[in-house]
C-alpha cells in the first residue's frame, strides 16, 4: 500500500493514458476515477468545464485512427464523462444540474436508451457508459425518468452480455464495477437483481486478467459482500518495483486500440488492497 501511495504522490498531476499502439494523451475520465478511488484531489489535474465534459484534455493525439478523425470533427463532449464529472467532482448548482439532466433526456434512441454522445448523428449506446450515466441520474433523484435504460442494463446483466467487454470497455469487470457504483443509489433494487449481480461476480473470481481488471473485480466483490482473496494475491504479485500497477480499461470502438492509465490502475489497486 505504501509503495502504491508513493507512486501516486510522485506522479501527481501527470498521469497520462497510453494506447496499445504506443500513443500517449491526456484525458479527464481516468483522472476522475483516480479522484474517486483515492479521495485526494491533489493527485489529479482536471480540465475545467462548465456543465458538459469531454473525455479528452487539450489537443487530440494525432495518430492514424479513424475513430479519432471522426471524433475530432464532432461535438467532443459526451454524456458519460459529463455524468462521471458531475457525480465525482460536482461544482454546479442544483438548477444547473437539472438543466443538464433535462438535456441528456433528449439524447435517447428509439428504444429510450441513453446514448453516449451529444451528437444526434451518432446514436451509440454502451452498457458500461449507460450505467455511469444512470448513476448520475439516480444520485440526483431522477432515476425513474430513465427506466428504459435501467431495464436494458439489467437485461445485459442477466444475459451476461458483458462477458467479452463492451464496444468501449475491455473486460467484464468494468461493467460489474460500474454496477457496484450504481446499485446503492437505486431505491428498492429487486432481490433478483442483487442475487444475479452477486452470482455474476462469483463467476469471475479467479479468472485471469491484468492488474487493473483484478482491482475492479476485487472492489466490486467487496461491495457485493464477497471475498476475492485469490485475486488479491494475484494482484499483489503484479505490483511493479516502483509501486505501480498497469492494465487496459477502454478501447476505441472502430480500431480496437486499447487504452490504459498506470495512475488509474494504481489508484484502483490501492483501493482494492485496502
Image (tube, rainbow, N blue to C red):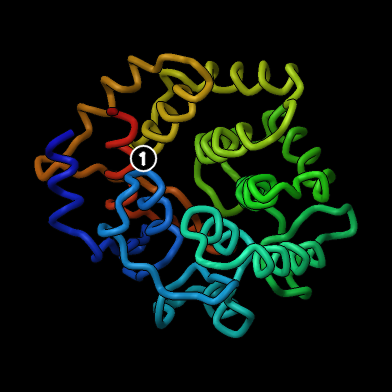
Residue at 50% across / 45% down in the picture? 170
User: Which quarter of the figure is the C terminus placed in?
Assistant: top left
Q: Quadrant of the N terminus?
A: top left
Closer to the camera in the image, 252 or 224: 224
State the residue at coordinates (63%, 52%): 136
Residue 132 percent coordinates (x, y): 60, 49
Residue 224: x percent and y percent? Answer: 53, 21
Extreme left residue here? 241
Q: Is residue 244 left or right of residue 76?
A: left
- Out of 219 and 238, give the one closest to the viewer: 219
Answer left or right for 117 relative to 82: right
Q: Quadrant of residue 266?
A: top left
User: How many marks do you count on the picture?
Assistant: 1
Where residue 108 sits, quadrant-wise, is bottom right
Residue 116: horizontal and vertical position, in percent?
Answer: 67, 61
Q: Residue at x 30, y 51 (%)?
A: 40
The residue furthest right is 110
Image height of 61 relative to 2, above or below: below
- In the rendered image, the vertical position of residue 103 relative to residue 140, given as above or below: below
The quarter of the picture where residue 112 lies is bottom right
Secondary element type, mark 1 = helix
**Neighbours of disc 1 within 10 Å: few (<14), some (14-19), many (20+):** many
The relative height of residue 70 versus residue 28 in the rendered view (above or below) is below
Label 1 sits on residue: 212
Residue at x 75% of width, y 49% of height: 142
Identify which residue, 205 or 227, lies in the foreground. Answer: 227
Q: Position of residue 5 (x, y in %)?
A: 18, 43
Amino acid at each position: 500500500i505504501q509503495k502504491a501511495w508513493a507512486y501516486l504522490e510522485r506522479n501527481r498531476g501527470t498521469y497520462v493514458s497510453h494506447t496499445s499502439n504506443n500513443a500517449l494523451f491526456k484525458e479527464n475520465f481516468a483522472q476522475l476515477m483516480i479522484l474517486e478511488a483515492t479521495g485526494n484531489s491533489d493527485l489529479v489535474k482536471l480540465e475545467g468545464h462548465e456543465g458538459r465534459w469531454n473525455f479528452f484534455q487539450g489537443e487530440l493525439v494525432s495518430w492514424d485512427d479513424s475513430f479519432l478523425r471522426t471524433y475530432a470533427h464532432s461535438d467532443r463532449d459526451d454524456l458519460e464523462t459529463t455524468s462521471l464529472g458531475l457525480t465525482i467532482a460536482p461544482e454546479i448548482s442544483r438548477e444547473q444540474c437539472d438543466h443538464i439532466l433535462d438535456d441528456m433526456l433528449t439524447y435517447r434512441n428509439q428504444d429510450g436508451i441513453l446514448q453516449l454522445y451529444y451528437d444526434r448523428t451518432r446514436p451509440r449506446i454502451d452498457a458500461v457508459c449507460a450505467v455511469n450515466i444512470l448513476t448520475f441520474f439516480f444520485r440526483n433523484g431522477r432515476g425513474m425518468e430513465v427506466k428504459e435504460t435501467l431495464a436494458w442494463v439489467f437485461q445485459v446483466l442477466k444475459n451476461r452480455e458483458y462477458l467479452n467487454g463492451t464496444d468501449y470497455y475491455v473486460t467484464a469487470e468494468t461493467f460489474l464495477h460500474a454496477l457496484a457504483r450504481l446499485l446503492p443509489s437505486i431505491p428498492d433494487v429487486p432481490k433478483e437483481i442483487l442475487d444475479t449481480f452477486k452470482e455474476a461476480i462469483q463467476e469471475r473470481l479467479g479468472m485471469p486478467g491484468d492488474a487493473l481488471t483484478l482491482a475492479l473485480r476485487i472492489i466490486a466483490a467487496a461491495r457485493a459482500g464477497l471475498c476475492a482473496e485469490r485475486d488479491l494475491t494475484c494482484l499483489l504479485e503484479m505490483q511493479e518495483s516502483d509501486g505501480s500497477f498497469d492494465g487496459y480499461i477502454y478501447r476505441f470502438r472502430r480500431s480496437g486500440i486499447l487504452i490504459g492509465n498506470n495512475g488509474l490502475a494504481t489508484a484502483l489497486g490501492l483501493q482494492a488492497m485496502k
